[in-house]
Amino acid sequence: MKFFGITLLLLTPLVVISLGMDILLGFDLDNSIKLAFNPFLVKDPAELILFYILLAFLVFSFFYRKKKKGNTKGQQ
């Protein structure tokens, strides 16, 4: 419960700051809310490619560790 509370206490001011900066830059409120809550809309194609590469590394490392852990159990 404490973790959830801390997360909300950090998330709230960060979202307000993000919305405030978007409004100061001239975006309307609807567009600012959409950009704040969907970060994939504001990414460049290069950032998306890097995100997918890092996500693939994460998935492969998970399966590699699981396979390695299974091999060590069989040897004992």
Image (spheres, grey):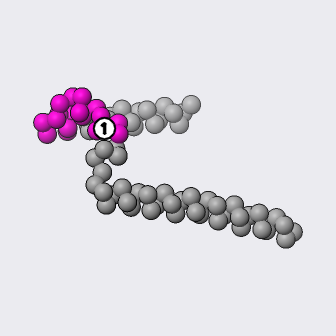
Work out whether 40 lies above or below 4.
below
**Residue 55: % across, % down:** 48, 57
Assign the magenta stretch its main secondary structure.
Answer: helix
Work out whether 36 lies above or below 51.
above
Q: Which residue is mark 1?
A: 36
Residue 36: name its quadrant: top left
Is residue 60 or residue 15 the one in the foreground?
60
On the rendered structure, is 54 left or right of 73?
A: left
Residue 21: name its quadrant: top left
**Residue 39: % across, % down:** 34, 44
* Magenta region includes residue 62: no
Number of marks in the rendered image: 1
Q: Residue at x 87, y 69 (%)?
A: 76
Q: Which residues are magenta?
A: 20-38
Work out whether 37 lies above or below 68.
above
What type is the residue that disc 1 sits on?
Ala
Is residue 71 or residue 10 the one in the foreground?
71
Residue at the extreme bottom: 75
Say if residue 35 shows up in the picture: yes
**Residue 19: % across, % down:** 25, 34
Q: Residue at x 36, y 55 (%)?
A: 48
**Residue 1: % across, % down:** 56, 31
Residue at the extreme top: 30
Q: Residues within 10 Å of mark 1 (few under 14, many from 20)?
A: some
Say if residue 16 shows up in the picture: no
Q: Secondary structure at mark 1?
A: helix
Q: Residue at x 28, y 47 (%)?
A: 42
On the rendered structure, is 48 left or right of 60?
A: left
